[in-house]
Amino acid sequence: MAGQAYPYSVRYGAREPWLAPWPRAGLYLVWRAVIALIRPAVFIALLAGAALSAREGWSGTPMAPLAPDHSVETRIEAQLAASVPAGARPLDYWNAAMGQALASAPGRPPDIPLAASLARALPGLKGRDALAFHVLTRNRSPAHVNADLRARPAWERASRLESALTRRLGQGAHLDPPELIFASPALVQRLERARALYGPALDSAEAWFLAPRGAALNLSALPGWGGEGAAIVFGDGRDLAVHGCALLAAQGRRPGACASLPAGRADPVLAGLLLQTVSAAGEAAPGWRLIAGAYVSGHLDPDLARQLALGPDAPLGREALMASLMPLLVEAGGVWSQPWRYQDAVADAADEYARAARLPVEEAHAIAHALNAVRRSDGAIAALRSTRWLSSPRDAERLARIARAAPGQMLALDALAGPDILHAVRTPVLAGARAPAPRDQGLRLAAFALAALAFLLVAAALSGAALARRTGRAGVLARLDAAMSRLILGRNS
């Protein structure tokens, strides 16, 4: 009858499913599901493969997280180990270095930050495995421990060494840092006594670099001081008033507003750094205080400081600096007594100065942010003193990478390895990046090919259906379906 719908099986010359035994009918339904889904499944698989290949070929994002690159840590430990004098025992050398750091003299306080940093550096100085072996030999002979470890698989040997070291450091959890568990009791007592006497002043200095809050800081009272005389900084407009008036006095000018101010330094580099420091805000502000403090303390390279303070043309920078400071200096008394009222004027002066002197603003801010990162990991005093490693803006980024790789050890690296430690990070290793893969071009071609196949499949299905209607000849998939239907259900007799 015209318009009557027949089951697929009848159209293909097979029996209707409900007339066949149930195992055959069930198998037929499974087959129908497979034949109905095969085209969409292949289409989706091709599109998914194309999308994944395109993502891998163009984005550069790895499919799985990369294993962390420990090469920087390894190179740092190698340089620490190389700093031990030939024939010296690492533990004895370590104890002696901490004792020397804690030695005090008139006008020179004990170097508590250096002693604590040296303590944290012990695993790298001696080697983690060697230190763990030392722990295991506290109650057993070295020969016995060595034989026991050699008898175990490599993974178990490494696990046993790491567990021994972790357990021993856990016993020193009450110490700061826990590595002091390996130091002599007399040395630990000296450090605790020094902290009781000088710790509050160091804590105040650390807090000042984060936020001065109107307080003054005497940089010459900090351990590691390398400058001359006393150096008091305020972190606000008072610095500009004092040192700006000193610049005017050196030129033979002394406005009446400067009469009541204390003496400053007639140093245009210092004034240029302080102008940018006082105007800095946000994350860069502590870094700028560190830059200015490092210059005053004698740590920062003079050529780098001059470049940051005066720009590429020093004479032009000096002229632009004085022109920018003059609106503040004519009111130097007010700036000195109420610096908070002049913060907007300081910001305007700094912007004008940066434009006129063509200052390397981006490079300077990069250094400030890198030093702030060191401050967060090692403290402001460590960041201040490690600026002596810097000879270019790129060195600041390397400094921050070392601080990330060996947190809390910056001063120890400075004392034991010196600026040569920068060689440990001469080759940049970008976090989260991967090396260029030679297969990227192939992945891009595969993405195009799979996408083309997916759309070719759609075109073939549409053209095949149209061709079947015109010629009455079924396609390959339809003929396969008919043959399987007759095979499963039997012929319709």
Image (cartoon, grey):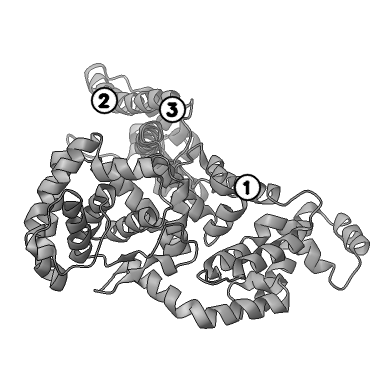
Q: Give the x, y percent position of residue 264.
A: 26, 60
Q: Look at the image and tell me in which quarter the C terminus lies.
A: top left
**In front: 373, or 70?**
373
Specify the amino acid type for callout 1.
Thr
- Of circles 3 and 1, the one toward us is 1
Neighbor class of circle 1 (other Cα within 10 Å; few <14, some 14-19, many 20+) is some
Q: Is residue 314 above or below residue 272?
A: above
- Dot 1 lies on which element? helix
Task: Tell me, yes or no, whether the two marked residues, 3 and 2, touch with CB atoms within 8 Å.
Answer: no
Q: Earlier in the sequence, mark 3 or mark 2?
A: 3
User: In what element is the residue under mark 2?
Assistant: helix
For the residues labelled 3 and 2, the Cα–Cα distance comes to 38 Å
Q: Residue farthest to the top?
A: 471
Given residues 163 and 486, the one toward you in this image is 163
The quadrant of the rendering that contains the N terminus is top left
**x, y (%) of residue 86?**
78, 48
Mark 2 surroundings within 10 Å by alpha-carbon count, few (fewer than 14), some (14 through 19), many (20 or more):
some
Amino acid marked by disc 3: Asp
Q: Residue at x 74, y 68 (%)?
A: 164
Q: Taking the image as drawn, is residue 307 in sight?
A: yes
